[in-house]
Protein backbone atom coordinates (compact mmCIF):
# COMPACT_ATOMS: atom_id res chain seq x y z
CA UNK A 1 0.00 0.00 0.00
CA UNK A 2 1.33 3.40 -0.98
CA UNK A 3 2.13 5.80 1.86
CA UNK A 4 0.78 9.34 1.53
CA UNK A 5 1.79 12.48 3.40
CA UNK A 6 0.01 15.55 4.74
CA UNK A 7 -0.56 17.86 7.70
CA UNK A 8 -2.83 17.67 10.74
CA UNK A 9 -4.46 20.47 12.72
CA UNK A 10 -3.98 18.52 15.94
CA UNK A 11 -1.55 20.03 18.44
CA UNK A 12 1.24 17.46 18.51
CA UNK A 13 4.38 17.42 20.61
CA UNK A 14 7.48 15.28 20.64
CA UNK A 15 8.29 16.35 24.22
CA UNK A 16 5.62 14.77 26.40
CA UNK A 17 8.00 14.59 29.34
CA UNK A 18 8.30 18.36 29.73
CA UNK A 19 5.45 18.67 32.30
CA UNK A 20 7.38 16.38 34.68
CA UNK A 21 10.53 18.39 34.00
CA UNK A 22 8.66 21.63 34.70
CA UNK A 23 7.20 20.21 37.92
CA UNK A 24 10.64 19.40 39.34
CA UNK A 25 12.00 22.79 38.25
CA UNK A 26 9.37 24.55 40.40
CA UNK A 27 11.34 23.56 43.50
CA UNK A 28 14.13 25.94 42.41
CA UNK A 29 11.76 28.87 43.07
CA UNK A 30 13.40 30.95 40.36
CA UNK A 31 10.94 33.90 40.68
CA UNK A 32 11.90 34.23 44.36
CA UNK A 33 15.61 34.14 43.48
CA UNK A 34 15.45 36.76 40.74
CA UNK A 35 12.45 38.84 41.79
CA UNK A 36 9.82 40.52 39.60
CA UNK A 37 10.76 41.85 36.17
CA UNK A 38 9.31 44.60 33.99
CA UNK A 39 10.85 43.10 30.85
CA UNK A 40 8.61 41.61 28.16
CA UNK A 41 10.29 38.26 28.72
CA UNK A 42 11.27 37.91 32.42
CA UNK A 43 14.67 36.61 33.45
CA UNK A 44 13.09 33.44 34.80
CA UNK A 45 11.60 32.69 31.36
CA UNK A 46 15.01 33.22 29.73
CA UNK A 47 16.73 30.88 32.17
CA UNK A 48 13.95 28.26 32.07
CA UNK A 49 14.17 28.20 28.28
CA UNK A 50 17.94 27.66 28.34
CA UNK A 51 17.70 24.90 30.97
CA UNK A 52 15.00 23.11 28.98
CA UNK A 53 17.06 23.31 25.77
CA UNK A 54 20.06 21.79 27.55
CA UNK A 55 17.88 19.00 28.95
CA UNK A 56 16.86 18.23 25.37
CA UNK A 57 20.49 18.12 24.26
CA UNK A 58 20.40 21.52 22.52
CA UNK A 59 23.50 23.49 23.48
CA UNK A 60 23.52 26.37 20.97
CA UNK A 61 21.38 29.48 21.31
CA UNK A 62 19.97 29.08 17.79
CA UNK A 63 18.15 25.89 18.89
CA UNK A 64 15.37 27.99 20.44
CA UNK A 65 14.31 29.16 16.97
CA UNK A 66 12.82 25.73 16.22
CA UNK A 67 10.40 26.10 19.16
CA UNK A 68 9.29 29.73 18.92
CA UNK A 69 6.15 28.81 16.96
CA UNK A 70 5.54 25.63 18.96
CA UNK A 71 2.54 26.49 21.14
CA UNK A 72 2.63 23.19 23.02
CA UNK A 73 6.32 23.49 23.92
CA UNK A 74 5.68 26.88 25.49
CA UNK A 75 2.60 25.76 27.41
CA UNK A 76 4.22 22.62 28.76
CA UNK A 77 6.98 24.81 30.22
CA UNK A 78 4.38 27.28 31.59
CA UNK A 79 5.90 30.18 29.64
CA UNK A 80 4.00 33.00 27.96
CA UNK A 81 6.68 33.72 25.37
CA UNK A 82 9.93 32.23 24.13
CA UNK A 83 12.90 34.48 23.32
CA UNK A 84 14.58 34.63 19.95
CA UNK A 85 18.09 33.23 19.63
CA UNK A 86 19.50 36.77 19.63
CA UNK A 87 17.63 37.83 22.78
CA UNK A 88 18.55 34.57 24.54
CA UNK A 89 22.24 35.16 23.84
CA UNK A 90 22.15 38.86 24.76
CA UNK A 91 20.29 38.33 28.03
CA UNK A 92 22.66 35.56 29.19
CA UNK A 93 25.66 37.66 28.12
CA UNK A 94 24.32 40.53 30.26
CA UNK A 95 23.52 38.33 33.27
CA UNK A 96 25.11 39.54 36.55
CA UNK A 97 28.20 37.88 37.99
CA UNK A 98 26.26 36.48 40.97
CA UNK A 99 24.01 34.46 38.63
CA UNK A 100 26.10 31.31 39.10
CA UNK A 101 25.75 31.48 42.91
CA UNK A 102 21.99 31.87 42.57
CA UNK A 103 21.76 28.86 40.28
CA UNK A 104 23.92 26.86 42.66
CA UNK A 105 21.31 27.63 45.32
CA UNK A 106 18.50 26.76 42.87
CA UNK A 107 20.08 23.39 42.15
CA UNK A 108 20.36 22.59 45.86
CA UNK A 109 16.72 23.56 46.41
CA UNK A 110 15.65 21.08 43.72
CA UNK A 111 17.72 18.29 45.23
CA UNK A 112 16.51 19.10 48.75
CA UNK A 113 12.91 18.83 47.56
CA UNK A 114 13.18 15.72 45.38
CA UNK A 115 16.58 14.06 45.71
CA UNK A 116 17.81 11.52 48.22
CA UNK A 117 21.49 10.66 47.64
CA UNK A 118 22.06 6.93 47.95
CA UNK A 119 24.80 5.55 50.19
CA UNK A 120 27.11 2.73 49.16
CA UNK A 121 27.28 -0.70 50.77
CA UNK A 122 29.49 0.66 53.58
CA UNK A 123 26.99 3.35 54.57
CA UNK A 124 28.95 6.26 53.09
CA UNK A 125 27.49 8.75 50.62
CA UNK A 126 30.26 9.19 48.03
CA UNK A 127 31.33 12.71 47.09
CA UNK A 128 33.39 12.33 43.92
CA UNK A 129 35.44 15.36 42.91
CA UNK A 130 37.23 15.39 39.57
CA UNK A 131 38.21 17.60 36.66
CA UNK A 132 37.04 16.99 33.10
CA UNK A 133 38.90 18.57 30.15
CA UNK A 134 36.47 19.70 27.44
CA UNK A 135 37.70 19.91 23.87
CA UNK A 136 37.12 23.33 22.28
CA UNK A 137 39.90 23.08 19.70
CA UNK A 138 39.74 25.37 16.69
CA UNK A 139 37.97 28.16 18.58
CA UNK A 140 39.08 31.50 19.99
CA UNK A 141 36.85 31.41 23.02
CA UNK A 142 38.02 33.24 26.10
CA UNK A 143 39.78 30.89 28.55
CA UNK A 144 40.43 28.13 26.02
CA UNK A 145 44.00 26.89 26.50
CA UNK A 146 46.15 23.78 26.12
CA UNK A 147 45.00 21.03 28.53
CA UNK A 148 46.88 18.04 29.91
CA UNK A 149 44.87 15.84 27.53
CA UNK A 150 46.72 17.37 24.57
CA UNK A 151 43.99 19.59 23.10
CA UNK A 152 42.79 23.16 23.54
CA UNK A 153 39.75 23.55 25.73
CA UNK A 154 38.42 24.20 29.21
CA UNK A 155 39.30 22.35 32.43
CA UNK A 156 36.19 22.51 34.67
CA UNK A 157 35.92 20.97 38.12
CA UNK A 158 32.90 18.89 39.21
CA UNK A 159 31.55 17.34 42.41
CA UNK A 160 29.00 14.50 42.28
CA UNK A 161 27.05 13.19 45.26
CA UNK A 162 25.56 9.78 45.97
CA UNK A 163 25.42 6.59 43.98
CA UNK A 164 23.10 8.37 41.52
CA UNK A 165 25.68 11.07 40.83
CA UNK A 166 23.84 14.32 41.54
CA UNK A 167 25.98 17.30 40.51
CA UNK A 168 26.30 19.41 43.68
CA UNK A 169 28.98 21.82 42.49
CA UNK A 170 30.85 22.82 39.34
CA UNK A 171 33.29 25.49 38.24
CA UNK A 172 34.39 26.40 34.73
CA UNK A 173 38.16 26.96 34.60
CA UNK A 174 40.66 27.86 31.88
CA UNK A 175 42.19 24.88 30.11
CA UNK A 176 45.69 25.49 31.46
CA UNK A 177 44.65 25.82 35.12
CA UNK A 178 46.03 23.10 37.39
CA UNK A 179 43.48 20.95 39.21
CA UNK A 180 44.81 21.99 42.64
CA UNK A 181 44.63 25.74 42.01
CA UNK A 182 41.67 27.20 43.96
CA UNK A 183 40.64 23.63 44.81
CA UNK A 184 40.21 24.06 48.57
CA UNK A 185 37.39 26.69 48.39
CA UNK A 186 35.64 24.48 45.82
CA UNK A 187 36.04 21.44 48.07
CA UNK A 188 34.57 23.25 51.09
CA UNK A 189 31.62 24.46 49.01
CA UNK A 190 30.98 20.93 47.75
CA UNK A 191 31.07 19.50 51.30
CA UNK A 192 28.71 22.19 52.59
CA UNK A 193 26.32 21.51 49.70
CA UNK A 194 26.44 17.76 50.29
CA UNK A 195 25.65 18.18 53.99
CA UNK A 196 22.50 20.10 53.08
CA UNK A 197 21.29 17.04 51.18
CA UNK A 198 22.18 14.17 53.51
CA UNK A 199 22.91 13.49 57.17
CA UNK A 200 24.78 10.27 56.38
CA UNK A 201 28.60 10.24 56.56
CA UNK A 202 30.34 11.51 53.43
CA UNK A 203 33.25 9.83 51.65
CA UNK A 204 35.22 12.28 49.50
CA UNK A 205 37.17 10.65 46.67
CA UNK A 206 39.81 12.42 44.59
CA UNK A 207 42.52 11.38 42.16
CA UNK A 208 46.24 12.14 42.16
CA UNK A 209 45.79 15.61 40.63
CA UNK A 210 44.71 16.83 44.08
CA UNK A 211 47.45 15.07 46.02
CA UNK A 212 48.73 17.73 48.40
CA UNK A 213 49.04 18.20 52.13
CA UNK A 214 46.65 21.13 51.80
CA UNK A 215 43.93 18.78 50.52
CA UNK A 216 44.45 16.27 53.32
CA UNK A 217 44.33 19.03 55.94
CA UNK A 218 41.09 20.38 54.40
CA UNK A 219 39.50 16.91 54.66
CA UNK A 220 40.52 16.64 58.30
CA UNK A 221 39.32 20.19 59.03
CA UNK A 222 35.92 19.45 57.49
CA UNK A 223 35.77 16.10 59.34
CA UNK A 224 35.06 14.25 56.09
CA UNK A 225 36.22 10.70 55.46
CA UNK A 226 38.28 10.54 52.29
CA UNK A 227 40.24 8.41 49.86
CA UNK A 228 42.71 10.32 47.70
CA UNK A 229 45.18 8.81 45.29
CA UNK A 230 48.78 9.71 46.05
CA UNK A 231 51.00 10.97 43.27
CA UNK A 232 54.25 8.95 43.53
CA UNK A 233 56.09 11.73 41.70
CA UNK A 234 59.76 10.62 41.58
CA UNK A 235 59.38 7.57 43.83
CA UNK A 236 60.96 4.52 42.18
CA UNK A 237 58.78 1.36 42.41
CA UNK A 238 61.88 -0.86 42.21
CA UNK A 239 63.54 0.90 45.13
CA UNK A 240 60.32 0.72 47.14
CA UNK A 241 60.08 -3.02 46.45
CA UNK A 242 63.64 -3.59 47.66
CA UNK A 243 63.13 -1.39 50.73
CA UNK A 244 60.32 -3.69 51.88
CA UNK A 245 62.89 -6.45 52.33
CA UNK A 246 62.28 -10.18 52.41
CA UNK A 247 59.38 -10.06 54.86
CA UNK A 248 56.92 -8.45 52.46
CA UNK A 249 53.27 -8.42 53.53
CA UNK A 250 51.31 -10.41 50.95
CA UNK A 251 48.34 -8.67 49.35
CA UNK A 252 47.72 -10.56 46.10
CA UNK A 253 49.55 -12.93 43.80
CA UNK A 254 49.04 -15.06 40.75
CA UNK A 255 50.82 -16.37 37.66
CA UNK A 256 53.58 -13.90 36.88
CA UNK A 257 52.96 -11.31 39.62
CA UNK A 258 53.19 -10.68 43.35
CA UNK A 259 51.77 -7.63 45.15
CA UNK A 260 53.08 -6.52 48.53
CA UNK A 261 51.22 -4.25 50.95
CA UNK A 262 52.61 -1.40 53.03
CA UNK A 263 50.09 0.08 55.48
CA UNK A 264 51.49 2.96 57.53
CA UNK A 265 50.70 6.39 58.95
CA UNK A 266 52.39 9.61 57.84
CA UNK A 267 52.67 12.75 59.96
CA UNK A 268 51.54 16.03 58.37
CA UNK A 269 53.26 19.35 59.03
CA UNK A 270 50.54 20.34 61.52
CA UNK A 271 51.17 17.19 63.60
CA UNK A 272 48.11 15.19 62.52
CA UNK A 273 48.59 11.78 60.94
CA UNK A 274 47.03 10.21 57.85
CA UNK A 275 46.89 6.57 56.81
CA UNK A 276 48.82 5.69 53.64
CA UNK A 277 48.20 2.38 51.84
CA UNK A 278 50.85 1.43 49.28
CA UNK A 279 50.77 -1.54 46.92
CA UNK A 280 53.94 -2.56 45.10
CA UNK A 281 53.69 -5.19 42.37
CA UNK A 282 56.51 -7.21 40.87
CA UNK A 283 55.49 -8.60 37.49
CA UNK A 284 57.61 -11.35 35.96
CA UNK A 285 55.26 -12.29 33.15
CA UNK A 286 52.02 -11.61 31.35
CA UNK A 287 50.08 -14.84 31.35
CA UNK A 288 52.23 -17.55 29.80
CA UNK A 289 54.75 -15.06 28.45
CA UNK A 290 57.73 -14.43 30.72
CA UNK A 291 59.48 -11.05 30.85
CA UNK A 292 63.22 -10.70 30.34
CA UNK A 293 63.35 -8.39 33.38
CA UNK A 294 60.75 -7.86 36.11
CA UNK A 295 58.45 -4.84 35.94
CA UNK A 296 57.42 -2.93 39.05
CA UNK A 297 54.20 -0.97 39.65
CA UNK A 298 53.30 1.34 42.52
CA UNK A 299 49.90 2.51 43.78
CA UNK A 300 49.29 4.61 46.91
CA UNK A 301 46.14 5.91 48.58
CA UNK A 302 45.67 8.42 51.40
CA UNK A 303 42.64 7.61 53.52
CA UNK A 304 40.95 8.29 56.84
CA UNK A 305 39.14 4.93 56.86
CA UNK A 306 40.00 2.10 59.23
CA UNK A 307 38.67 -0.54 56.84
CA UNK A 308 40.82 -3.38 55.47
CA UNK A 309 43.03 -2.34 52.55
CA UNK A 310 41.01 -4.49 50.09
CA UNK A 311 37.82 -2.62 50.92
CA UNK A 312 39.51 0.79 50.70
CA UNK A 313 40.78 -0.11 47.22
CA UNK A 314 37.32 -1.27 46.15
CA UNK A 315 35.78 1.97 47.39
CA UNK A 316 38.34 4.01 45.48
CA UNK A 317 37.84 2.03 42.26
CA UNK A 318 34.16 3.08 42.35
CA UNK A 319 35.43 6.66 41.95
CA UNK A 320 35.87 5.84 38.25
CA UNK A 321 32.07 6.06 37.89
CA UNK A 322 32.37 9.86 37.76
CA UNK A 323 33.95 9.41 34.30
CA UNK A 324 30.52 8.22 33.18
CA UNK A 325 28.95 11.32 34.72
CA UNK A 326 31.39 13.46 32.71
CA UNK A 327 30.45 11.51 29.60
CA UNK A 328 26.73 12.07 30.18
CA UNK A 329 27.29 15.81 30.44
CA UNK A 330 29.48 15.94 27.33
CA UNK A 331 27.77 13.41 25.06
CA UNK A 332 24.14 13.07 26.26
CA UNK A 333 23.50 16.74 27.04
CA UNK A 334 26.11 17.61 24.41
CA UNK A 335 27.96 20.24 26.44
CA UNK A 336 31.59 19.90 25.45
CA UNK A 337 31.93 22.73 22.95
CA UNK A 338 30.49 25.83 24.58
CA UNK A 339 28.26 28.23 22.60
CA UNK A 340 29.77 31.61 23.51
CA UNK A 341 33.10 33.37 22.99
CA UNK A 342 32.80 34.89 26.47
CA UNK A 343 34.12 32.97 29.46
CA UNK A 344 31.50 34.39 31.87
CA UNK A 345 28.65 33.41 29.55
CA UNK A 346 29.97 29.88 29.24
CA UNK A 347 30.23 29.72 33.04
CA UNK A 348 26.52 30.63 33.18
CA UNK A 349 25.74 27.91 30.62
CA UNK A 350 27.53 25.36 32.82
CA UNK A 351 25.37 26.50 35.77
CA UNK A 352 22.24 25.94 33.68
CA UNK A 353 23.62 22.55 32.67
CA UNK A 354 24.03 21.62 36.35
CA UNK A 355 20.29 22.11 36.88
CA UNK A 356 19.40 20.28 33.65
CA UNK A 357 21.71 17.41 34.66
CA UNK A 358 20.10 17.06 38.09
CA UNK A 359 16.56 17.35 36.74
CA UNK A 360 17.23 14.53 34.27
CA UNK A 361 18.76 12.47 37.07
CA UNK A 362 15.66 13.05 39.24
CA UNK A 363 13.38 12.08 36.35
CA UNK A 364 15.43 8.91 36.08
CA UNK A 365 14.68 8.24 39.75
CA UNK A 366 10.96 8.63 39.01
CA UNK A 367 11.33 6.17 36.14
CA UNK A 368 13.00 3.69 38.52
CA UNK A 369 10.04 3.88 40.90
CA UNK A 370 7.75 2.75 38.06
CA UNK A 371 10.03 -0.08 36.94
CA UNK A 372 7.22 -2.73 37.23
CA UNK A 373 5.61 -1.20 34.13
CA UNK A 374 8.67 -1.97 32.02
CA UNK A 375 9.11 -5.06 29.83
CA UNK A 376 10.58 -7.98 31.79
CA UNK A 377 14.02 -7.70 30.19
CA UNK A 378 14.43 -4.07 31.26
CA UNK A 379 12.72 -4.58 34.61
CA UNK A 380 15.26 -7.18 35.68
CA UNK A 381 18.31 -5.02 34.94
CA UNK A 382 17.82 -3.21 38.27
CA UNK A 383 20.59 -0.66 37.64
CA UNK A 384 21.43 2.03 40.20
CA UNK A 385 20.64 4.85 37.78
CA UNK A 386 19.37 5.45 34.27
CA UNK A 387 21.78 7.12 31.88
CA UNK A 388 20.66 10.64 30.97
CA UNK A 389 20.29 9.67 27.32
CA UNK A 390 17.77 6.98 28.34
CA UNK A 391 15.72 9.55 30.26
CA UNK A 392 15.81 11.99 27.36
CA UNK A 393 14.89 9.46 24.68
CA UNK A 394 12.28 7.58 26.71
CA UNK A 395 10.58 10.42 28.59
CA UNK A 396 11.36 13.89 27.26
CA UNK A 397 11.14 12.87 23.62
CA UNK A 398 7.94 10.85 23.97
CA UNK A 399 5.20 11.90 21.52
CA UNK A 400 1.74 13.06 22.56
CA UNK A 401 -1.35 15.02 21.48
CA UNK A 402 -2.21 18.23 23.32
CA UNK A 403 -5.92 19.11 23.58
CA UNK A 404 -7.94 21.85 25.27
CA UNK A 405 -11.59 21.43 26.19
CA UNK A 406 -13.91 22.87 28.85
CA UNK A 407 -11.06 24.83 30.45
CA UNK A 408 -8.98 21.67 30.66
CA UNK A 409 -5.63 20.94 29.09
CA UNK A 410 -4.97 17.27 28.37
CA UNK A 411 -1.83 15.55 27.13
CA UNK A 412 -2.77 12.26 25.46
CA UNK A 413 -0.24 9.51 24.88
CA UNK A 414 -0.59 6.74 22.32
CA UNK A 415 -2.13 3.66 23.95
CA UNK A 416 -0.05 1.29 21.81
CA UNK A 417 3.12 3.41 21.83
CA UNK A 418 6.19 1.81 23.37
CA UNK A 419 6.67 2.66 27.07
CA UNK A 420 3.53 4.86 27.13
CA UNK A 421 2.24 3.39 30.43
CA UNK A 422 5.65 3.94 32.02
CA UNK A 423 5.80 7.56 30.81
CA UNK A 424 2.23 8.21 31.95
CA UNK A 425 3.04 6.93 35.45
CA UNK A 426 6.00 9.31 35.67
CA UNK A 427 3.89 12.26 34.47
CA UNK A 428 1.19 11.53 37.05
CA UNK A 429 3.84 11.36 39.78
CA UNK A 430 4.98 14.86 38.78
CA UNK A 431 1.75 16.87 38.47
CA UNK A 432 2.13 20.14 36.56
Image: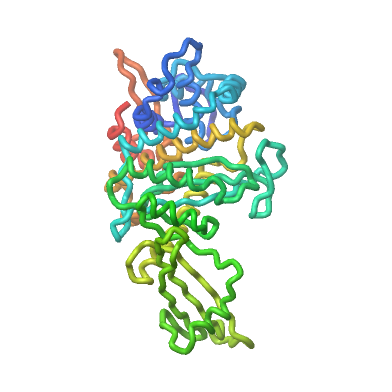
Residue at 28% of width from left, 57% of height from top? 123
The x, y position of residue 325, in whole percent, is 47, 49
Q: Position of residue 303 (x, y in %)?
A: 40, 63
Residue drawn at (39%, 46%) of the image: 191
Q: Is residue 57 above or below residue 270?
A: above
Q: Quadrant of residue 411?
A: top left
Q: Is residue 376 visible?
A: no
Q: Residue at x 40, y 67 (%)?
A: 275
Image quadrant in which you'd find residue 309: bottom left
Residue 313 in the image: above or below residue 89 = below
Can see residue 383?
yes
Relative side of 148 to 431, left or right:
right
Q: Is residue 191 above or below residue 269?
A: above
Disc tally is 0
Measuring from the top left, give residue 220's x and y in whole percent.
39, 55
- Judge by depth and name the residue closer to the eye, 189 or 250: 189
Colouring mode (rainbow / by chain / secondary structure / one colour): rainbow
Say which quadrant the C terminus sits in.
top left
Name the spot of residue 11 as percent of width and height, x first: 43, 22
Does residue 7 sit above or below 154 in this rendering? above
Q: Is residue 320 left or right of residue 224?
A: right
Amino acid sequence: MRLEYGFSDLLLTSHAGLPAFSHLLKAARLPALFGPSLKTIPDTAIYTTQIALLALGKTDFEAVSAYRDDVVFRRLLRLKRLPSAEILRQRIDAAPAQLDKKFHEASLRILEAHGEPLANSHGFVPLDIDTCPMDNSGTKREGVAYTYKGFNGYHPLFAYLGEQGYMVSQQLRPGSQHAQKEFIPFFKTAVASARRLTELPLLARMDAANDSEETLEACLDEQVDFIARRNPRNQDPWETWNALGEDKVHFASGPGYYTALLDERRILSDGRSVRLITLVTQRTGHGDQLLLAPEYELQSLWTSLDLPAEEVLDLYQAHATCEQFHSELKSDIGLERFPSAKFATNAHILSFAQIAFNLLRLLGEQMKRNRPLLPKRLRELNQVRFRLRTVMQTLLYHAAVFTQHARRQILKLGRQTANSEWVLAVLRACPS
